Image: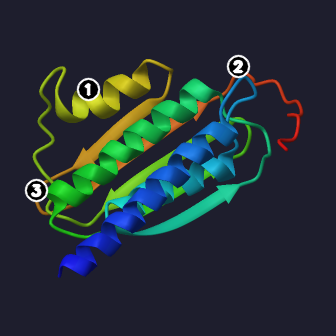
Amino acid sequence: EVEATRARCAHDLRELRHLRDTRNDVTGDTGVGAEALVRSLAARAAVLSLDVEVADRISSAAPIPTDVADAVAGACAEALINVAKHSGVRTAELTFAWDGALLDVRVQDDGRGWTGELVADHGVARSILDRTADVGIDALVATAPGAGTTVSLTWRSTTRRCRVGTRASRS
């Protein structure tokens, strides 16, 4: 049992390092690549020992503004933590769609759900809804006792664009 715990800790540490390194590679003035963001979200689920089915529809290479990507990553991490801690299930679905103008991300579980009652500046209200509202992401949490929970995040790029450029290669 001790060896299994050590192995799991080593695995989790590798995943956390991957998240750190991915973030360092994909963020900055040029925004965040959609594929890197999806990989980061999937890695977060793995760290939580969740079995997450990932479906992505990425039809644009346009970067996502860093503040939007950070808010999506933080909100999805919180949603996945809630699955692990509260849903009573170890599985979830993550859908991610980006066409260069519309970003649509969903985290869904078939767990126990909850009443949907929110406490201002606490829990889901703070970790998901406030975080995403600050950067113009529309967030919806749909849940009911016995019906699971779906967190939906939608961002439309109407005027904000990241500049696309090249980065000097690292030696």
* Labels 2, 3: front one: 2
Q: Which image quadrant: the N terminus?
A: bottom left
Q: Residues within 10 Å of mark 3 (few under 14, many from 20)?
A: few
Q: Which residue is mark 2?
A: 160
Residue shown at the point (61%, 47%) measured from the top left: 22
* Labels 1, 2: front one: 1
**165 or 124: nearer the viewer:** 165
Q: Is residue 111 left or right of residue 154?
A: left
**96 or 3: nearer the viewer:** 3
The CA span between labels 2 and 3 is 39 Å
**Which color scheme does this rendered protein use?**
rainbow
Residues tagged 1 and 2 counted as in contact (Cβ below 8 A): no
Looking at the picture, which amino acid does disc 1 mark?
A: Arg
Looking at the picture, which amino acid does disc 3 mark?
A: Pro
Residue shown at the point (41%, 37%) measured from the top left: 74
Q: Which image quadrant: the C terminus?
A: top right
Residue 157 x, y percent position in the rendering: 67, 27
Image quarter of residue 61: top right
The CA span between labels 1 and 2 is 25 Å
Residue 48 x, y percent position in the rendering: 32, 60
Q: Which residue is mark 3?
A: 145
Q: Give the mark nearest the N terminus, 1 or 2.
A: 1
Query: Can the viewer see residue 150 in this picture?
Result: no
Above or below residue 115? Residue 69 is above
Q: Which residue is mark 1?
A: 126
